[in-house]
Image (cartoon, rainbow, N blue to C red):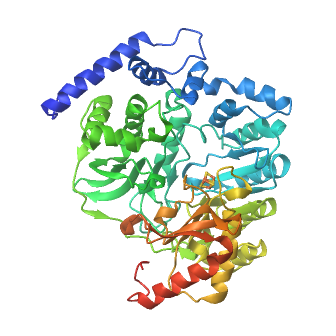
Amino acid sequence: MPDDGFNPEQQEYLKGFMAGVEARRGALTPAAGNGGAPADALRTAQDRTLAAGGKLVPQEQAKRDRHPLDRWDELTARAAEGKFPKPIDDFIGRFHGLFFVGPVQNSFMCRLRIPGGILNAWQLRGVADIAAECAGGYADVTTRANLQYREIPAEKGPEVVMRLGEIGLLPRGTGADNIRNITASPTAGIDAAELVDTRPLVRALHHHILNTRDLFGLPRKFNISLSGGGAVEVLEETNDIALAAVETSEGIRFRLNLGGITGHRDFARETGVVVAEAEVVAVCDAILRVFIAEGDRTDRAKARLKYVLDRMGVEGFLAAVEARLGRRLARLPVLGTAPAPAKHGHVGVQAQKQPGLRYIGVTMPLGRLTVAQLRGLADVAQAFGSGTIRLTVWQNLLISDIPEAQVPQARAAIAALGLGWEASAVRGGLVACTGAAGCKFAASHTKQHAATLADFLEANIALDAPVNIHLTGCHHSCAQHYIADIGLLGTKVERGEDMVEGYDLHVGGGAGPAQKIGRMIRKGVAQDELGPVVLGLLRAWLAGRDGPGDSFHL
Ligand code: SF4
């Protein structure tokens, strides 16, 4: 029981907390040979909920009936018969990265796991082969610097998972109540402005999660992001654990903020804690275990970390984390941060910290890559660079390590694939979720409307400063409309006796140093009126601002 530096209130909390941990450890060790026993961590929440007379939600009960990671046999048996899972089993399948997206597409979606968004040419070729042979012939780039397949027939689902595992991209835990793909600075290791190369940390954390069974089956999904500084905004403050490299009196540390969830209009909260590189995995592990023990298992709308922080307070939560760690967390003032990235500053040809090398920021229509483009990008990365492809949370990607003299050929090869590399004030920050073409929650066809909107704006207005426009199909806010300059939230709009697709219009959101939740200024803009309405907004902004460096506000 640690006692150094804790005040009496914290001591009291820690005593009770550790007593509970010890009691559960003794009582709930799974029986020998019982590979399907629920994890100890799951039991802790169950015990407390049931003792208080609460009722577990069906997802929680399903997790306890048989550990979802042990239900691969059920998934493969059903797939062999060409059948998709039943609803609650679909939740279980998501532990293996497979999502049933019926009735919209009547097929599986599979979300990959690409730590830090960085992968190699040989992996991207493997991704392309799987897309061609087992899915819809394309992969979508997600807002977690990740890729996902769609249109996977039932019998191909397990095959996709197995083949991804064979190329080092096992999609375990990319859906349901698990820790999602870790995001990090995509220019890690090549950026003169970075404070820390996050790649080794992301790798260590990724494997810690994959190899720690107790960290699957959380109260709800969980996001972790590490920013080492550099040219690309990682949006770490929208994550449950937000780590950002900062300067302190003891050297470079990660500032720890907690509980970001912009769909609920909340950025991660400041804790005052800083974490050394060597402690990142242990501190994240302890935070996760307190979340497991304290998260709500009876109301899924209140099950994210934000609500635990609301209930316990930041200091109370940190005290529990410290109890897990057995020591105090460091609190140091932040003396400096990495320079704020320029908006869309990673698009196009950019200098690396290695003399003579460049990276190219590539944009793509609708955040989607066909099999030919996936293979072509792998070829470009290998022929002109080091074979490294780096995905960003902005639904675009970087090809790095290209000698300056090779840049013209690399650009030509990218253009030949139908992909862009020129900075565009609109397309560099145009983000759209899957939308109604592939998601049952969507009120609008976000990707198609994003493309139409970008075409319209580029034909009608010349912008001298980048603008972020995010289209999201429902309140889940996968495209994070609240932090965009112009955020569009899908909705149905009345037109005469019909309902048509449209959007609620938000403006003034931001991230990083310009952190702000956008406000709604107009409800129910029909999709075919979107172009003129957004054009009017942009004209008003141009007329009212002080200069090109002025942030977006009206
Ligand atoms: Fe689906 Fe809603 Fe997410 Fe868009 S925001 S992908 S509609 S859940």
Q: Nearer the viewer, residue 108 or 73?
A: 108
Q: How many marks?
A: 0
Residue 425 visible (yes or no): no
User: Which residue is rendered at x = 53% and y = 29% of the image?
Assistant: 57
Residue furthest left as drawn: 8
User: Which residue is rendered at x = 77% and y = 38% of the image?
Assistant: 157
Image location of residue 416, percent across then percent down = 78, 75
Image quarter in which the C terminus is found: bottom left
User: Which residue is rendered at x = 54% and y = 86% of the image?
Assistant: 463
In the image, is 28 to the left or to the right of 357? left
Residue furthest front as drawn: 497
In the image, is 100 to the left or to the right of 297? right
Image location of residue 376, percent across then percent down = 77, 64
Against 438, residue 510 (above or below) is below
Residue 378 visible (yes or no): yes
Q: Nearer the viewer, residue 351 or 519?
A: 519
Image quarter in which the N terminus is found: top left
In the image, is 398 to the left or to the right of 218? right
Against 110, residue 22 (above or below) is above
In the image, is 309 to the left or to the right of 443? left
Image location of residue 81, percent across then percent down = 86, 29
Image location of residue 88, percent across then percent down = 66, 30
Q: Nearer the viewer, residue 187 or 404?
A: 187
User: Which residue is rendered at x = 66% and y = 46% of the image?
Assistant: 111
